[in-house]
Image (cartoon, rainbow, N blue to C red):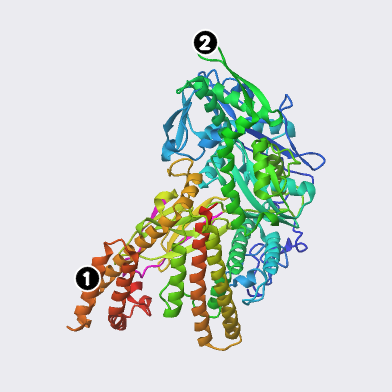
Amino acid sequence: MSAARACWSCKGPAGDAAFCVVCGVLQPPDSGADLFAVLGLPRGFDLDRPVLEESYRQAQQRFHPDRFATRSAGERRYSLEWITRINTAFQTLGNPLTRARHLLELLGHAAPEHRNTTPVDPAFLMEVMELREALAEVDPAADDAPRRLERLRREVEQRVDLETGLIRDSLARAMAGEGTTVLEEAVRHLDRLRYHQRFLEEVDRLEERLF
Amino acid sequence: MDLLLDIAEPGAAPLPHQLRPGEEWRVVGIDLGTTFSLVAAIDLEGRPACIPDEQGQVSLASVVHYRADGSILVGEQARALAVQSPRDTISSVKRFMGRAMEEVPAEPYRLEPGEGGMVRIRAGGRSLSPVEISAEILKELKKRAEQALGGALRGAVVTVPAYFDDAQRQATKDACRLAGLEVLRLVNEPTAAALAYGLDQGREGLYAIYDLGGGTFDISILRLTRGVFQVLATGGNSSLGGDDFDRALASLFLEEMGIAQPDPGLLQAAQQAAREAKEALTGAEETVVVLPRPEGAAYRRTLTRQEMEQRIDRLVRATGMPCRRALKDAGLTPADLEGVVLVGGSTRVPAVRRFVADLFQTEPLADLDPDRIVALGAAHQADLLAGNRRSDMLLVDVTPLSLGLETMGGLVEKVVPRNSPIPTARGQEFTTYKDGQTAMAIHVVQGERETVDQCRSLARFELRGIPPMVAGAARIRVAFQVDADGLLTVTAREMTTGVEQSVAVKPSYGLGDNEIAAMLRDALDHGAGDLQLRQLREARVEADRVRHAVLAALEQDRDLLDDQEMPAIETAMGRLQQVAGGEDHQSINDAIAALDKATVFFAQRRMDRNIRSVMTGRKVTDFS
């Protein structure tokens, strides 16, 4: 946001804050701001859940449309834009996978949206296929289904932790300016993390059938 | 310059649209229930209270009677006529909101199809929409509130089941409009209840709200932190409630009477007897049921609580799955909860309480009247939205069902996952499938299943005027916006030219009735089959696209290939065509990969020739 911006309401100098310094009216959100900035968080992969939740709560308190229900149509519209960004930020940053993807974008490396973008390591592919076979073998009607699903979940969750740690490292190095090979590395681990998360989603779906 | 002269202290601008102190808005909270409805407002002490009618009754039976002379009765007077003229006396109209004819039980009404596939009901010689019938109930509540508050209402917060879909919410809002009520906000029933409960006790922490009403069941998991009521997950069944208990008991009585096809009057009488028995068995261990027969001696039997519980056991258990799923969605176990709050008259049934205590491993909380708590919370929210007082209190709700789009092969691409905080906006980019394609059909669906025909269809529209381009070059962004009422707007836009279409999703004709529940149940029953089917369909669609793309490329740039290169591609194409008709998605994918490999160099050469930047860096699989 530029400090020279004029307030849409009073036409005075609004400053670069969310609310005009002159008349106190809500300003439109800066569409260029990254999602960390939306919640007032430092840019980085490490993010404690309670910290994220507290910033989210504070942002809700300041910008939720309910706070502007009796204000002008302009402010009501901007509060809707703000809260939409805030909700997107909360959901994106709350998940390590989407958080990493957003960071990669900010680092100028468009994150892969589709499969087949990076060559997949055959050894990794074998691992994934073995896990999938094990999942396919689980019979939801069998008594041991919950136990087997739980064991598979734990196994994959360990891999998720491993990949998440590796993403954390490579992103930290990339942000310290170590260049593009580190980013490629991050993308590779991100790909693997996505495989694992998809797998966990399928475990979820199967588990719901046991409810 | 005039504008600048008005500048006041920061944050304290006396803007013309703000109200002067003391000039409070007359606003109310309305709980529009399946079996009865309530209206509440903030009283002189600043506490929410339900507004009684002239006889001192706060609950209004949600029953509307249409006389042949055109006059209309609402409430207890209407209910008294249900047995005598069952077809002209509409109860539980909430079940018909936003629904098609084949989605609702007909008995004892005369149903007919209306515009957009919505159901209509014939009563008192008129054809009525559920929206009109609901509006009669709302008008009655409005009249009552205006008398009590001494003037016209400025607006109302109206509650809906958390599990209501877009069509049901839209229908509710339309009913308010028809009744001359300005809707300040649609609020989910369990969320309103949590608000009343949390504020009453100044509580913090994680709570589950178990809301079993006359016709709907909701479960919501909330976190209460310093004024923010954040819904973490919600679930339910929009056609399960105490009415179903009554029906189960009534069918027992009719069975025992040996009547398979009761006339509408007898059916009504049996259901009323069932309701009375159910209520009696809340306190008593047994009760006597008497039903007059069309001829002969009256049917008479003693019903024990245990017998009733056996009869409704399956229904009570049906509330378990949504609860377990909501807990899981919130990433919680029962031990994480501070408590479970009971809402809705049907939670008075002892079997329900036992089931909840068992499920959540804690004694449920019911220190506020479960019939009134929703209306009280709604009144609170109305007061806050009207700006009548300053408070840190804030409700943050979520979408109950995933929203998505139909993609190739009848599959659903989820755009807004269930339990996303609202308001929310999400977008997804799509591209054209064929060269020169100028229009794209957009089909919006709601539900958890992976195939379109098993989700609820919300809207269809077409984005036209896409400039002819190579397949895959157009970038069509479909944006979903869910507002604070939970209502959806969808916009489609071609990004390179800015051609745009938008649609506010109106109730459109969709699937079979009990569907939200049934849809979810099916999703769980068919999960594995779905997955395989999905993989196969995906593979087939992909095979089709790749073949299309390669053929189109060959037609254009065949001269880039020499006589040795061409056969390799043809072999790979032939192989793909051969396996694409089969049932094994893996061999289709393998053939796609092989064709992909065989055409890499061709794609490279085409790209060098074709300076179209949109294709740079893509492989043949990305052409289409």
State which mark lies toward you, 1 or 2.
2
Q: Is residue B473 magenta?
A: yes
Q: Does B59 sit above or below residue B334? A: above
Q: Residue at x 44, y 65 (%)?
A: B429
Q: Position of residue A163 (x, y in %)?
A: 55, 77
Task: Classify residue B560 by image quadrant.
Answer: bottom left
Viewer-side residue, A11 vs B292 = B292
Label 1 packing within 10 angstroms: few (<14), some (14-19), many (20+): some
Q: Which mark is residue B574?
A: 1
Q: Residue at x 69, y 70 (%)?
A: A17
Q: Which mark is residue B443?
A: none
**Marks 1, 2 in one chain:** yes
Q: Earlier in the sequence, mark 1 or mark 2?
A: 2
Q: Disc 2 marks which amino acid?
A: Gly
Task: Classify residue B8 by image quadrant.
Answer: bottom right
Label 2 packing within 10 angstroms: few (<14), some (14-19), many (20+): few
Q: Does A27 sit above or below residue B271? A: below
**Contact check, label 1 and label 2, Cβ < 8 Å:** no
Q: Which residue is mark 2?
A: B296
On the question of residue B134 being in view, the answer is no
Q: Position of residue B427 (x, y in %)?
A: 49, 63
- Report the quarter where the C terminus of chain B lies: bottom left
Q: Chain for mark 2?
A: B
Residue that lies at the very extreme toward the top in this rendered image: B296
Q: Position of residue A30 (x, y in %)?
A: 60, 69
Q: Residue at x 70, y 67 (%)?
A: A50
Q: Is residue A10 magenta?
A: no
Q: Which stretch appears magenta?
A: B460-482
Q: CA distance from mark 1 to mark 2?
A: 79 Å
